[in-house]
Every structure is written in structure tokens, then in C-alpha cells.
Amino acid sequence: MARDDIRPVIKLRSTAGTGYTYVTRKNRRNDPDRLELRKYDPVVRRHVLFREER
């Protein structure tokens, strides 16, 4: 129970509009805001910004 409270599972969706997602965990204490990471999108074959969706 406590494990899910501190490190929830989140989806990172591509901002390129391809619908590609990564699934990861984040620490809510260190990153209370929505997470944004630059990761590889294989559909457009380049690195793009991925934003957290809930």
C-alpha cells in the first residue's frame, strides 16, 4: 500500500501526436508536478518531449 502512494505508475505520452507511450514510476516527493522527459519515439524515429498523463 505505501509503495503505491510514494512511487505511482505513470504513463509518458509523446507530444508528437503518435500515441506512443512509456510506462514508468516516479517519486512523488521529489517530483510533485507532472513529469516531462525527452525520450525516443520510434514512430517518428527521433527524440521528442514526453509528458506525464494520469
Image (cartoon, rainbow, N blue to C red):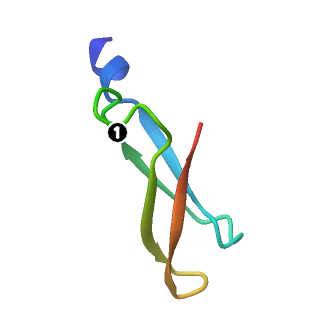
Residue at (36, 37) in percent of width and height: 31
**Depicted 18 relative to depicted 54: above or below:** below
* The C terminus sits in image quarter: top right
Which residue is labeled 1 in the image? 26
**Direction bottom: furthest residue:** 45
Q: Along the horizontal axis of the image, is 26 left or right of 35?
A: left
Residue 51 lies, in percent from the top left, at 55, 54
Give whichever of 30, 44 is nearer the camera.
30
Instruction: Give the number of callouts.
Output: 1
Residue at (45, 47) in percent of width and height: 35
Q: Along the horizontal axis of the image, is 39 left or right of 29?
A: right
Amino acid carrying label 1: it is: Lys
Secondary structure category for the residue under label 1 = loop
**Direction right: furthest residue:** 17
Give whichever of 28, 13 is nearer the camera.
28
Residue at (52, 81) in percent of width and height: 42
* The N terminus sits in image quarter: top left
Residue 14 lies, in percent from the top left, at 59, 65
**Depicted 31 relative to depicted 42: above or below:** above
Badge 1 density bin: few <14, some 14–19, many ≥20, Cα 10 Å: some
Q: Quadrant of residue 20?
A: bottom right
**Depicted 17 relative to depicted 21: above or below:** below
Q: Quadrant of residue 30?
A: top left
Residue 37 lies, in percent from the top left, at 42, 61
